[in-house]
Image: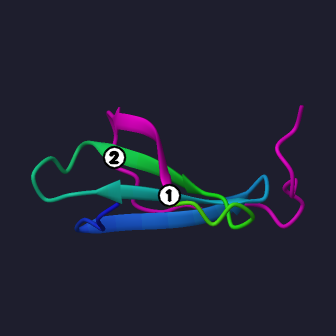
């Protein structure tokens, strides 16, 4: 994962979510998820989201585990 010119992050469902936009295509974002329990490298979960994510946030009452 490389950080681009714009990025944001959020914590949801026990993981960290990174939204990255680079200067080559400012209207596209890539979404990565990092699972601190596995400590594996961040996983690309959305390739080329056709919008620029310039901020992210999560409510304090968001789940700490992914809902089933």
Identify the mark at residue 1; answer none if there is no mark: none
Q: Which residue is mark 1?
A: 42
Which residue: 50% across, 57% down? 42
Q: Quadrant of the C terminus?
A: top right
Q: Which residue is mark 2?
A: 29
Classify residue 1 as left or right of residue 34. left
The tag earlier along the polypeptide, 1 or 2, is 2
* Quarter of the image where one finds residue 59: bottom right
On whether residue 23 falls in the magenta region, the answer is: no
Residue 50, placed above or below residue 6: above
Residue 21, placed above or below residue 25: below
Structure colour scheme: rainbow
Separation (CA) of disc 1 from disc 2: 15 Å
Percent position of residue 8, x then y: 46, 65
Percent position of residue 41, x then y: 50, 61
Which residue: 32% across, 33% down? 50
Along the viewing direction, whichever of 38 and 35 lies nearer the viewer: 38
Seen as rendered, the residue at the extreme left is 24
Q: Which residues are magenta?
A: 42-68
Q: Quick one: label 2, few (<14), some, or many (20+) residues within 10 Å?
A: many
Q: Quadrant of the N terminus?
A: bottom left
On whether residue 53 falls in the magenta region, the answer is: yes
Percent position of residue 62, x then y: 84, 56
Classify residue 60 as left or right of residue 36. right
Percent position of residue 46, x then y: 45, 36
Mark whose residue sits in front, 1 or 2: 1
């Amino acid at each position: 994962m490389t950080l681009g010119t714009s990025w944001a992050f959020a914590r949801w469902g026990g993981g960290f979510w990174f939204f990255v936009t680079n200067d080559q295509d400012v209207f596209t974002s890539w979404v990565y998820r990092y699972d601190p329990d596995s400590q594996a490298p961040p996983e690309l979960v959305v390739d080329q989201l056709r919008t620029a994510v310039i901020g992210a946030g999560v409510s304090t009452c968001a789940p700490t585990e992914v809902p089933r």
